[in-house]
Image (cartoon, helix red, strand yellow):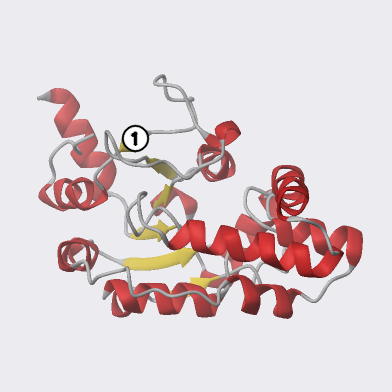
């Protein structure tokens, strides 16, 4: 009971809720991210005249080294960010269905709600609209607002804090990638890692996955975002 009270007290002091987009606000087994991933591979093939396997290997090299494939292409090849983002996010979102329970859970959270994504604003908006949660958020901080420096870079979070007047001590961040929670935790945010439910497909890269023992920069791990948010609002210990 004492621990439950401490958890309730912790979230009672929070009134800024920050959400990653891809594989966080929609289910891990959605086909959305694989579609974007395939579009990036195709972009690389067109750009360099490579076969699919070579393009994908280069794509993943840039992704792991720079945080996004786009950043690697900008650093090493000076490509147009706008062209890349338009191409990568030109996908069919009809597989996404409105998530009314998630919308209600987000709406019930007290205070401000923001999206912080390494994708584009247009992609975030269209995806949120497909999920029926776009009206729940005050704003979207995208890769353009980050000056094309992706999470987990510290300067990206500082730009986000400054632009939106976010006090980390009053904030909670939800993410599917553990490395993207290191800086938020260090700055005083409460951090929650959103992972696939048991048996769900996991589209994260091998180096992005964490063991069962949570790193110290992750305060909570949940496989059910809606239930987690409902428990926060109810003042109960969030369900894993």
Q: Position of residue 141 (x, y in %)?
A: 54, 70
Q: Position of residue 181 (x, y in %)?
A: 52, 42
Residue 58 can be seen in this image? yes
Q: Give the residue at x 13% y 40%.
A: 236
Q: Position of residue 108 (x, y in %)?
A: 17, 64
Mark 1: few, some, or many residues within 10 Å (few <14, many ≥20)? many
Q: Give the residue at x 61% y 70%.
A: 88
Which one is nearer the viewer's eye here, 19 or 30? Answer: 30
The answer to whether residue 222 is above or below residue 89 is above
Which one is nearer the viewer's eye here, 167 or 227? Answer: 227
Question: In the picture provided, is 207 more to the left or to the right than 189?
Answer: right
Which one is nearer the viewer's eye here, 28 or 56? Answer: 56
Quarter of the image for the C terminus: give it: top left
Give residue 180's quadrant in the image: top right
Residue 118 can be seen in this image? no
Give residue 20's quadrant in the image: bottom left
Question: In the picture provided, is 4 more to the left or to the right than 28?
Answer: left
The answer to whether residue 197 is above or below residue 93 is above
Which one is nearer the viewer's eye here, 194 or 45? Answer: 45
The answer to whether residue 122 is above or below residue 33 is below
Quarter of the image for the N terminus: give it: top left
Q: Spot the residue most to the top.
A: 213
Give residue 69's quadrant in the image: bottom right
Secondary structure type for disc 1:
strand
Q: Give the residue at x 17% y 36%.
A: 237
Q: Give the residue at x 20% y 39%.
A: 238
Residue annotated with mark 1: 221
Q: Position of residue 157 (x, y in %)?
A: 60, 56
Question: In the picture provided, is 110 more to the left or to the right than 5?
Answer: right
């Amino acid at each position: 009971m004492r621990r439950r009270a401490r958890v309730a007290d912790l979230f009672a002091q929070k009134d800024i809720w920050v959400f990653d987009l891809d594989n966080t606000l929609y289910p891990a087994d959605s086909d959305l991210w694989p579609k974007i991933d395939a579009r990036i591979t195709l972009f690389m093939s067109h750009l360099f005249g490579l076969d699919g396997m070579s393009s994908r290997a280069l794509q993943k090299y840039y992704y792991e080294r720079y945080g996004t494939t786009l950043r690697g292409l900008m650093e090493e090849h000076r490509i147009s960010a706008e062209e890349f983002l338009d191409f990568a996010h030109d996908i069919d979102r009809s597989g996404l269905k409105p998530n009314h329970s998630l919308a209600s859970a987000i709406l019930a959270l007290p205070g401000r709600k923001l999206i912080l994504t390494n994708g584009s604003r247009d992609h975030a908006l269209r995806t949120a609209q497909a999920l029926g949660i776009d009206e729940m958020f005050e704003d979207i901080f995208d890769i353009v607002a980050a000056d094309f420096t992706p999470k987990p870079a510290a300067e990206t979070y500082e730009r986000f804090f400054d632009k939106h007047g976010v006090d980390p001590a009053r904030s909670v961040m939800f993410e599917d990638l553990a490395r993207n929670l290191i800086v938020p935790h260090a700055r005083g945010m409460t951090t929650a890692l959103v992972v696939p439910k048991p048996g769900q497909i996991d589209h994260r890269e091998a180096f992005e996955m964490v063991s069962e023992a949570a790193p110290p920069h992750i305060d909570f791990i949940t496989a059910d975002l809606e239930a987690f948010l409902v428990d926060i609002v109810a003042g109960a210990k969030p369900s894993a």
